[in-house]
C-alpha cells in the first residue's frame, strides 16, 4: 500500500504562513521548525529566511521553548534534570539556555517529586534483600533522570 506523497511547498510565503501556524499551535525549537520546513520541501535560503522572520515576529523563541519544555517534562512526566537536559540537547537548544531553563525548577518541588516517585516504586518492588531493593530503587530514579547523589540522599533518609 503506497502512502500518499506529502505536498511540497515551493513558495516562501506559503511556507511562512504554514510555519506560523505550526509555531502558534505549541512552543517549538528552531531545529524542529527547520526540520519541518525541509520536510515540506523548501530550500536552505528560504528556510533560513522563514526562521529569521519567525524569530522577529516572536513565533519562535528558544528561551520560551526551553522553559516550557522543562516545565512540561518535570510537572507532567516527573523527569529529572539529567533527562530533561538530554531532551533539550536533542532539540539542539544551546547550553546556556538549558542551564537557565533548568533553574526554573524549584529545589523543594524537585526533591518532593523524587521522594514521591521512589516511594511509589518502592510499593511495587518485591525484593526482600535490602541492598538489592535499594539498588533497584536507585536505578529506577536514575532512569528517570535524577542525580545519583540526590537519589542516594532520599533513599538514606527514607525508611523504604
Image: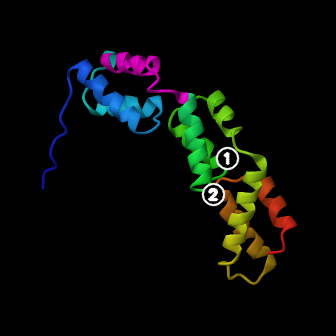
- Examine the rendering and report whether any part of residue 96 can be seen: yes
Q: Is residue 26 above or below residue 116?
A: above
Magenta: main secondary structure: helix
Residue 74 position, x and y percent, is 62, 50
**10 Å crowding of disc 2: few (<14), some (14-19), many (20+):** some
Residue displayed at 56% across by 37% down: 89
Pick the front one: 118 or 16: 16
Magenta residues, start to end: 46-62
Residue 97 position, x and y percent, is 62, 29
Whether residue 69 appears in magenta in the rendering, the answer is no
Residue 116 position, x and y percent, is 71, 65
Sequence order check: which comes first, mark 2 or mark 1?
Answer: 1
* 3D distance between C-alphas at marks 2 and 1: 9 Å
- Examine the rendering and report whether any part of residue 93 can be seen: no
| Residue ID for mark 1 | 81
Identify the disc placed on residue 144.
Answer: 2
Residue displayed at 74% across by 52% down: 109
- Image quadrant assignment for residue 138: bottom right
Residue 8 position, x and y percent, is 19, 31
Specify whether 142 is left or right of 62: right
Whether residue 51 appears in magenta in the rendering, the answer is yes
- What element does badge 1 sit on? helix
Specify whether 105 is left or right of 92: right
* Image mark count: 2
Amino acid at each position: 500500500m503506497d502512502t500518499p506523497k506529502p505536498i511540497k511547498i515551493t513558495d516562501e510565503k506559503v511556507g511562512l504562513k504554514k510555519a506560523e501556524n505550526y509555531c502558534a499551535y505549541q512552543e517549538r525549537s528552531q531545529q524542529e521548525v527547520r526540520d519541518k520546513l525541509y520536510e515540506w520541501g523548501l530550500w536552505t535560503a528560504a528556510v533560513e529566511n522563514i526562521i529569521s522572520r519567525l524569530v522577529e515576529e516572536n513565533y519562535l523563541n528558544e528561551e520560551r521553548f526551553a522553559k516550557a519544555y522543562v516545565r512540561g517534562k518535570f510537572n507532567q512526566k516527573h523527569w529529572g534534570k539529567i533527562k530533561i537536559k538530554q531532551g533539550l540537547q536533542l532539540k539542539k537548544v544551546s547550553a546556556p539556555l538549558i542551564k537557565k531553563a533548568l533553574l526554573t525548577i524549584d529545589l523543594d518541588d524537585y526533591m518532593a517529586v523524587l521522594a514521591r516517585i521512589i516511594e511509589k516504586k518502592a510499593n511495587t518492588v518485591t525484593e526482600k534483600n535490602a541492598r538489592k531493593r535499594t539498588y533497584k530503587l536507585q536505578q529506577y530514579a536514575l532512569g528517570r533522570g535524577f542525580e545519583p547523589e540526590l537519589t542516594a540522599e532520599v533513599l538514606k533518609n527514607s525508611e523504604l
